[in-house]
Amino acid sequence: MYEDKTLVCKDCEQEFVFTAGEQEFYAEKGFQNEPVRCKDCRIARKNSMRQSKEMYTATCAECGQEAKVPFKPRNDRPIYCSNCFANHR
C-alpha cells in the first residue's frame, strides 16, 4: 500500500527516504503531515530543545538524592529522581 518516498530536509536540504514502514507508522498514529526534517536534523533539533530548558534542583522524596527537573518544584507534590520515578510507574 505504501511506497518509499524521497523528501528534502527543511534544515540541511539533503534528500532522505520516508520509508513505507514509517508512513504506515505515521498513519497508525494519526499523523497528518510528512516529516520535514531528516533523522539527523530531527535528533539535533530535539537535543537543542532539551539543552535550552531551564532545569531546577530538588531533593528526591524517596531516596533523598539530588534530582534535576524541567519544572519549578512545589511543596504540595513529591519530586523523585529518575530512578525512583521509574520505580513508581
Image (tube, grey):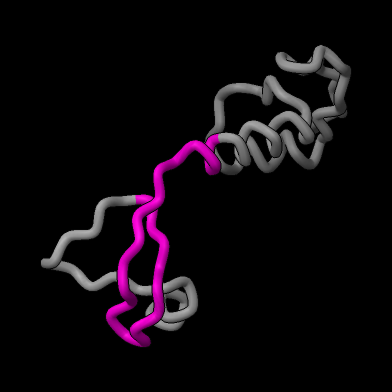
Q: Is residue 77 left or right of residue 64?
A: left
Residue located at (60% from left, 22% from top): 33
Q: Nearer the viewer, residue 4 or 64?
A: 64
Q: Which residues are magenta?
A: 49-70
Outermost residue toward the left in this view: 76
64 magenta-colored:
yes
Residue 16 seen in the figure: yes
Residue located at (35% from left, 55% from top): 56
Q: Can you tell which quarter of the image residue 79 is in?
A: bottom left
Q: Can you tell which quarter of the image residue 74 is in?
A: bottom left
Q: Is residue 63 above or below residue 47?
A: below
Q: Nearer the viewer, residue 77 or 18?
A: 77
Residue 27 seen in the figure: no
* Image coords of residue 45 (percent x, y): 63, 32
Q: Is residue 28 left or right of residue 18?
A: left
Q: Is residue 46 above or below residue 5?
A: below
